[in-house]
Amino acid sequence: MTAPLKSIEGEGDVARTMRDIGNRARQAVRTLALAPTATKDAALAAMAKTIIARADDILAANAEDVADAKAQGATAAFLDRLALDRKRIEAMAAGSDVVRALADPVGAVTESWTRPNGMTIERVRVPLGVVGVIYESRPNVTADAGALCLKAGNAVILRGGSESFRSARAIQAALAASLAEVGLPEAAIQLVPTRDRAAVGLMLAGLDGAIDVIVPRGGKGLVGRVQSEARVPVFAHLEGVCHVYVDKAADPAMAKRIVLNAKMRRTGVCGAAETLLIDRAAAAQLKPLVTMLIDAGCEVRGDEAVQAADARVKRASEDDWSTEYLDAIITAKVVDGVDAAIAHIERYGSHHTDAIVTADATAAEKFLNEVDSAIVLHNASTQFADGGEFGFGAEIGIATGRMHARGPVGVEQLTSFKYRVRGSGQIRP
């Protein structure tokens, strides 16, 4: 079992604790930035083993969190994000192993050239520094963020949601023990030891310059607050209003598989499809797709054409088209071809993840080129919007901004760069 919850009394105590966490993270990052790849990889291997070895402790802590959430009336989608089982714990450990197998980005020279005066210049990857991660119900973020930040030479300060406090603490304890095992500072992966919301505000202010970037993982309320209040750079997406467009040239069987998976595999993830668009020229596919979703337990809200296909379809409101449900609800609309689908996505989408199902290569390329989203797919489910599925081992989040990082944020995106210039006595005239 996990130790009793600690509390920090008073705003002053929270501020002092957070400053101490920030200072220790800054000290740790100096060590991590110079740590050999072999040492970081040894820590990641130890993390995978320790997470499995402490599975009972982690599950016991999670059971308490889930029980509290149920008592407070949490939704099924929320509980799905919060709950851990053996399979999910094994997935956390496997993610650490995959991150370990990735190439170390730190020190990689991405470009080099020689100037006419003989100076050589090279651009080399360096850690970002201290990463602050503020997240809500998903306790697995603790392990994912810890592994990714370590591989990229960053220290990380984790502020999990109050509803997953015990789970996150049990996971972080396993990670810290693994760091100590290989001689790296435990302060490289720290968890904020309080549920006090004042800690979030202090992180957003940057902890007196200790934090270099903030990554929020959670609902629209959390991400919106972070984006509006943060005084340091933010990697984030506000919401995932993801679309699947079924083109007139779509294979019917493929369309059904992709649509069902995109919506119903896990309804509470940011890559879950929230809107189905169907080409008017593919009218024969409309009823089978809508019936399939409803029979699978998904509520469908549609336009007149979709309502005509199945009497169980509810009328979609204007707000529905831009809503991220994170639940077994989807909007559906008939559109006049790929251009109309692209226009709808541009108007109502969130630039997260959108997919086209078609055998028409021209239509597919048009969609892939013109849809301005972080992730655009052809003949694949939107639920592949995940760093692990991209081969990143895990992700610290998905970013929809256009600066520095976009899409799944993995080890490479958790680095910056500097220029190394070598001369032989040159001076500027």
Image: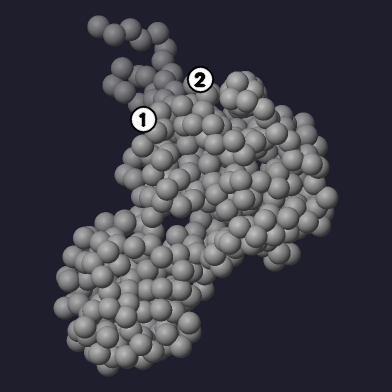
Query: Residue 16: where, in percent of width, then height?
Result: 62, 20
Q: Earlier in the sequence, mark 1 or mark 2?
A: 1
Left or right relative to 393: residue 89:
right
- Viewer-proximal residue among 45 and 157: 157
Looking at the image, residue 313 lies above or below residue 105? below
CA gap between label 1 and label 2 equals 37 Å
Q: Residue at x 62, y 39 (%)?
A: 195
Any mark on residue 208, and which?
2
Q: Residue at x 58, y 46 (%)?
A: 161
Looking at the rendered structure, the secondary structure element under dot 1 is strand
Residue under label 1 = 113
Looking at the rendered structure, the secondary structure element under dot 2 is loop
Q: Is residue 389 visible?
A: yes
Query: Residue 402: where, in percent of width, then height?
Result: 32, 44
Q: Residues within 10 Å of mark 2 (few under 14, many from 20)?
A: few
Query: Residue 168: where, in percent of width, then height?
Result: 67, 47
- Viewer-proximal residue among 288 and 305: 305
Badge 1 vs badge 2, beta-carbon distance below 8 Å: no
Q: How is the image coloured?
A: one colour
Query: Disc 1 or disc 2, which is closer to the eye?
Result: 2
Looking at the image, residue 329 lies above or below residue 390? below
Q: Is residue 108 visible?
A: no
Any mark on residue 278, and which?
none
The amino acid type, in three-letter code, at marker 2 is Asp
